[in-house]
């Protein structure tokens, strides 16, 4: 059931870093994005894969983690992602990708979840930093970084309460709570 | 397997219009989007559902269909969508949604596919027309219209050939062919 997979597909930010992910696995995930819808079928998205410690270390410093957790600077060494998929726009194909990268990211994350992995779609990126660190030609614009690994935290969905506060938070047991707006609030007609 | 579902989830533009879709079914699909990732968990997306002929008729004239099929003006009466889900941005929550609508659309379309439905993510919309026809407050910005129904056409995936042409086309048997770029072309590092 797709619903079970979607519920299992939470945003994870701490991982068993020692559990490696093969490049072939990442390619299989990108293939799911390849087979997904693209505006006017133009398929402007390109992908860079990373699954070795050296390349991962070039990417990690340029990512922002969990903006609402002010006391947490991001995953410490040992609980960092085992792999990344960087989604880029090939500007020689199209200047704007619409929402293609959202469609692609969701296909990839659902595929990762099915494989027992998890991760986080990261849009808060120091793009210049990654572009330089990986020597990415200027023709390619970084859109998203998907951080992937074997999740090392528990994430639970809750319903937004009367205060309307949507900020996720961590409890004393380090469980990550994510308030979602109720269905009645988001269907308006 | 998510891969099978993604392959089955093609963009369909002709439907058995007489096969109705319940509002409850559309709400279940929106719930899949509700449970999906949202940038900074802000959840700015709102949804309008349509599954009755009168409301559908207010939406249909404002949609553009299959730009590459120059001789086909879109589905004729009898093969039009049975339902629509309009995805809106609530600008009082956030001015820009990033790629939230792509994530949401993919969750909804995969859910629809699992239910034996199919459809098309439409971004080429006369937004003012729909906004007026449905009396949608200006606070909400139309992002996408998802057309849904029981598919009445065959769609096949192919690999882009040496010409690099990505335009979909229909053969003499009205089969819809969609060329996708090969994996080796889209993984660049």
Image (cartoon, coloured by chain):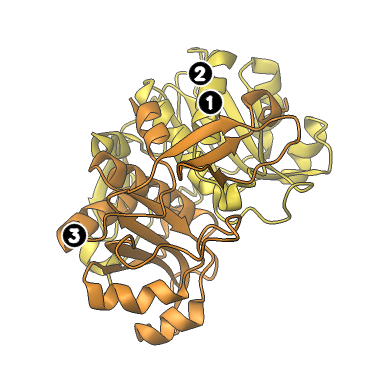
Chain colours: A orange, B yellow
The answer to whether the residues at label 1 and label 2 have Cβ atoms under 8 Å apart is yes
In the picture, the quarter occupied by the C terminus of chain B is: bottom left
The span from disc 3 to disc 2 (Cα, nearest Å) is 49 Å
Numbered disc 2: secondary structure: loop
Is the residue marked by circle 3 packed among few (<14), some (14-19), or many (20+) residues within 10 Å? some
Q: Are marks 3 and 2 on the same chain?
A: no
Give the vertical position of B117 relative to A15 (above or below): above
> Mark 3 highlights which residue?
A20
Q: Do labels 1 and 2 share a chain?
A: yes
Q: Mark 3 lies on which chain?
A: A
Q: Which mark is residue B10?
A: none
Q: Position of residue A28 (x, y in %)?
A: 21, 53
**Residue A81 seen:** yes
Numbered disc 3: secondary structure: loop
Q: Position of residue A179 (x, y in %)?
A: 59, 37
Locate residue B181 relative to residue A11 in the image: left or right. left
């Amino acid at each position: 059931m797709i619903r079970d997979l979607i519920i299992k597909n939470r945003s994870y930010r701490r991982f068993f870093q020692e559990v490696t992910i093969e490049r072939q696995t990442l390619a299989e995930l990108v293939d799911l994005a390849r087979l997904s819808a693209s505006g006017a079928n133009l398929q402007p998205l390109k992908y860079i894969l990373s699954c070795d410690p050296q390349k991962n270390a070039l990417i990690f410093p340029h990512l922002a983690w969990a903006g609402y957790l002010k006391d947490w600077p991001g995953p410490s060494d040992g609980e960092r992602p085992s792999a990344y998929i960087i989604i880029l726009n090939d500007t020689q194909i199209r200047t704007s990708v619409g929402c293609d990268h959202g469609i692609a990211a969701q296909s990839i994350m659902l595929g990762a979840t099915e494989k027992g992995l998890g991760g986080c779609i990261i849009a808060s990126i120091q793009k210049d930093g990654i572009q330089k660190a990986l020597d990415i030609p200027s023709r390619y614009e970084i859109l998203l970084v998907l951080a992937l690994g074997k999740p090392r935290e528990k994430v639970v969905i809750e319903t937004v309460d009367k205060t309307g506060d949507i900020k996720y938070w961590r409890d004393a047991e380090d469980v990550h709570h994510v308030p979602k707006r109720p269905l009645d609030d988001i269907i308006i007609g």
